[in-house]
Image (spheres, helix red, strand yellow):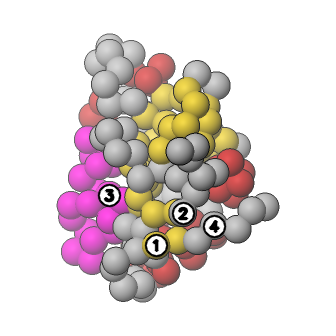
Amino acid sequence: MSSINWLSRKPPIDTSLVKTLEHSLGVSFPEKYVETVSKFPMGHPDKTCFDMSDRQEAVFSRFLEIPPDNSGGIYSDYSFISRNLESSRIIPFAEDPFGNFICFDYRDKNSNPSVVFWDHEADSDAGEESLKFIANSFDEFLDMLYEPDD
């Protein structure tokens, strides 16, 4: 596993905010995600690119905000995605620079989710076909990140 340096302009948040989000969504986030997003809220990695089967150099822009008042930020993004998909088990945790989301996929289980990409510009009738598989786990996703070619 290659080392990732995380950058954030926000101070660390209490993990209780992440646990409150988990509770309200009825899921268990990967431990590495909880640890990283707590230390680097709205943070971004130094290695920002990842590949998917149909796209090279997709970009991890930043983690979504986990607000202290349980509204806005990731809560709003989750609500938006849930209205556009048949499943409420797709939970965004990061975004790319173009308004797309990197999400946890809990459709088959409540813990150890896979990671998928939701293209917000996909045909509105595409539903869950607008989701593209990225990785089997958050750790596997982090291992895929690399520095962009200049």
Task: Tell me the tag on residue 58.
Answer: none
**Structural crowding at the residue carrying mark 1, measured as other residues with C-alpha within 10 Å and reported as few (<14), some (14–19) or many (≥20):** some
Q: Is residue 103 visible?
A: no
Residue found 48% across the figure and 44% down from its top = 59
Q: CA distance from mark 4 to mark 2?
A: 6 Å
N-term mark: 2 or 1? 1
Task: Tell me the tag on residue 74.
Answer: 3
Amino acid marked by disc 1: Leu
Task: Tell me the tag on residue 46.
Answer: 2
N-term mark: 4 or 2? 4
Residue found 58% across the figure and 31% down from its top = 56
User: Residue 119: x, y in percent?
Assistant: 39, 30
Amino acid marked by disc 2: Asp
Task: Tell me the tag on residue 7.
Answer: 1
Q: CA distance from mark 1 to mark 4?
A: 10 Å
User: Residue 116: x, y in percent?
Assistant: 54, 38
- C-beta proximity under 8 Å, tags 4 and 2: yes
Residue found 43% across the figure and 68% down from its top = 43
